[in-house]
Image (spheres, rainbow, N blue to C red):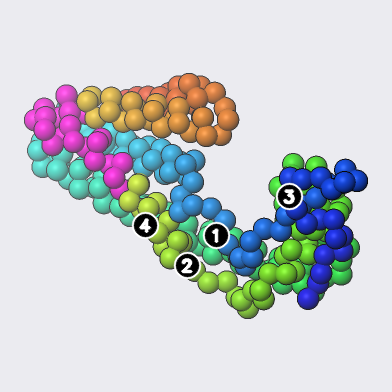
């Protein structure tokens, strides 16, 4: 088992009498969960995806000739399509989580087999470039030593309950986005009026989620909101032009 190479790296956020920066060891927890079930930007992205999908499907209805049977078929199709895509997206989420955990596990095993200099390089490569660029070599070495002090990791990556919860949340978000957009078709008898109301609801939701997404990624929130409104408007215009 490796030990720390610098005894001064012991307490975080403090200075020893010589003025040297010191660090605190984090709690021991091999392969901890890297994130919440769904990060805010992931939830927003799933909502945007579901809205665009259902807006495309509702816009495919030809209001000039549509009867109640046609509207019912469209509603069932929209619900079924978003449910299917939600399940597919959930499966992709599980695959992505499994791949990320496997990558982290491979890094830990490579670190255990590597020489100190090579291990420090592996730590730097695993960190975000901006973070790695401001860390000194002794800090990277401290991180390497702390990783080596973790209990022995499992031989292979395994899925966790959190992965399945995330997949279920993804599928549910995509599916639930369908309802606000199809409700006008359930309460308004005239197909043309219902479609216009549905389009207005969808575009409004696109604007709200676009604003939220812009804030999450550190860009202009209103710019992203406008971008999503334009995207929704283009989809509506396209479907109406093609006979919607």
Q: Nearer the viewer, residue 7 or 121?
A: 7
Q: Nearer the viewer, residue 201 or 139?
A: 139
Q: Nearer the viewer, residue 166 or 198?
A: 166
Q: Which residue is mark 2?
A: 160
**Res. 152 mark:** none
Q: Nearer the viewer, residue 141 or 72?
A: 141
Q: Is 136 included in the stretch rendered in magenta?
A: no
Is the magenta region chiefly helix, strand or loop? helix
Q: Which residues are magenta?
A: 175-195
- Of the numbered discs 4 and 2, the one sitting upstream in the chain is 2
Residue 214: image location, x then y, percent: 51, 29
The reply to whether dot 1 and dot 2 touch (C-beta < 8 Å) is yes
Q: Is 194 included in the stretch rendered in magenta?
A: yes
**Residue at mark 1 to residue at mark 4: CA–CA distance:** 17 Å
Q: Which residue is mark 3?
A: 12
Residue located 54% across and 59% down the image: 33
Q: Which numbered mark, 4 or 3, is in the foreground of this view? A: 3
Q: Which residue is mark 1?
A: 33
At numbered mark 4, what does the secondary structure look like: helix, strand or loop? helix
Residue located 53% across and 53% down the image: 35
Q: Which residue is mark 4?
A: 168
The reply to whether dot 1 and dot 3 touch (C-beta < 8 Å) is no
Residue located 78% across and 57% down the image: 10
Residue 243 in view here: no
**Residue at mark 4 to residue at mark 3: CA–CA distance:** 39 Å
- Which quarter of the figure has residue 32? bottom right
- Of the numbered discs 1 and 3, the one sitting upstream in the chain is 3
């Amino acid at each position: 088992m490796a030990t720390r190479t610098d005894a001064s790296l012991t307490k975080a956020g403090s200075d020893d009498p010589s003025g040297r920066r010191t660090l605190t060891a984090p709690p021991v927890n091999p392969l901890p969960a890297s994130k919440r079930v769904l990060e805010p930007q992931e939830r927003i992205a799933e909502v945007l995806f579901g809205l665009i999908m259902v807006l495309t499907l509702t816009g495919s209805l030809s209001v000039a000739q549509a009867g109640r049977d046609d509207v019912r078929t469209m509603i069932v199709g929209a619900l079924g399509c978003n449910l299917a895509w939600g399940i597919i997206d959930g499966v992709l989420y599980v695959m992505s989580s499994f791949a990320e955990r496997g990558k982290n596990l491979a890094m830990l095993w490579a670190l255990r087999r590597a020489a100190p200099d090579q291990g420090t390089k592996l730590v730097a490569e695993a960190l975000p470039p901006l973070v790695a660029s401001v860390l000194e070599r002794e800090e990277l070495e401290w991180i390497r030593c702390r990783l080596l002090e973790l209990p022995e990791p499992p031989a292979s990556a395994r899925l966790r309950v959190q992965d399945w919860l995330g997949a279920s949340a993804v599928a549910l978000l995509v599916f639930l986005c369908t309802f606000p957009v199809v409700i006008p078709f359930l309460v308004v008898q005239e197909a043309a009026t219902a479609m216009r109301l549905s389009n207005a609801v969808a575009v409004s939701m696109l604007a709200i989620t676009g604003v939220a997404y812009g804030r999450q990624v550190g860009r202009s929130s209103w710019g992203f909101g406008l971008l999503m409104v334009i995207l929704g408007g283009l989809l509506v215009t396209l479907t109406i032009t093609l006979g919607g």
